[in-house]
Amino acid sequence: MKPDKDIHRFEICLSGLGGQGVLTLGKIMGQALALGHGFNVAQTQSYGPEARGGASRTDLVISTLPISYPKTDKIDLLVALSQEACNKYFQLLKPGSILLVNTTLVKQVPTNQFLGLPFTEIAMDKLKLVQAMNTLVLGACTFLLPFARRAAMRKSLEDALPAKIVDINLKAFNMGYRDAQKAFGESPAIWAGLADSAPTAPSALVKAIKKKVPIKKKPAATKK
């Protein structure tokens, strides 16, 4: 499969705590971008010594070209699901990139230019299943990434999960996508101009983020 867009190099860091499903999130996203979109994808991961509660991180490098270096050093999209992760990895963002935080747990963001949704709160209150939080994040990231196709991400999700939990996770995926769309506006307005070299996001990104930050836990209803 040939990718819809040419991307020289695009780096994603998914970070949080052990038990938040960060590694599973990275695996599903990586498979979808490789098998469902046709990109070259390199994935690396690390986590703390504790099974739960320790630092957890998975990185993806995406390109239409062969990937010569599989690790991230200039991140285009950082997802921080915990305060510790946000503090630790914020400095790895390159100028003009996107920081997406879980506002349920990240209370002190080191910049006023960020996007946020209360992923943990949504999973607990609307889905009654905190373990579905990572799938909410997958939906939100699918909306934010202009080269990601929703159908391909859903297919990867269905293929990766046991049949008994597919339905609730598809619900979470769709909810994350819709909530991001309502909170952040149309994707091209957020990340306009992404082209063959995955350049630093232009001024339209900064304007969009400033307009939407901070994201309240209970945002005002959006007119349809």
Image (cartoon, helix red, strand yellow):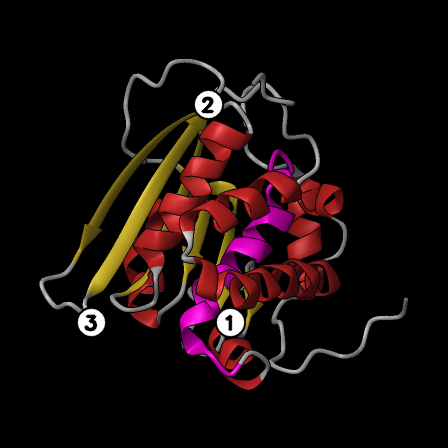
- Would you name the residue on which mark 2 appears? 63
Give the magenta range.
128-149
Would you place residue 8 above or below residue 188 in this image? above
Q: Up-down: is 98 above or below 130?
A: above
Q: Nearer the viewer, residue 5 or 132?
A: 132
In the rendered image, residue 206 lying in the magenta stretch gets the answer no
**Type of the residue with mark 3:** Arg
Q: Are marks 3 and 2 in contact (CB under 8 Å)?
A: no
The mark lying in front, picked from 3 and 2, is 3
- The residue wearing badge 3 is 52
Q: Position of residue 183 (x, y in %)?
A: 70, 65
| Structural distance between the alpha carbons of marks 2 and 1 | 28 Å
Q: Residues within 10 Å of mark 3 (few under 14, many from 20)?
A: few
Q: What is the quadrant of the N terminus in the image?
A: top right
- Measure the C-alpha gap from mark 3 to mark 1: 18 Å
Displayed quadrant of residue 117: bottom right
Q: Residue shown at 54%/22% (left/top)?
A: 7
Residue 74 location, quadrant: top left
Residue 38's x, y, as percent?
52, 23
Circle 2 — which element? strand
* Residue nearest the observer in this picture, 110 or 138: 138
> Helix or strand or loop: what does disc 1 sit on?
helix
Residue at the spot of label 1: 119
**Does residue 28 lie above or below 210 as drawn?**
above
Residue 154, given in percent of the width and then of the height, sits at 58, 48
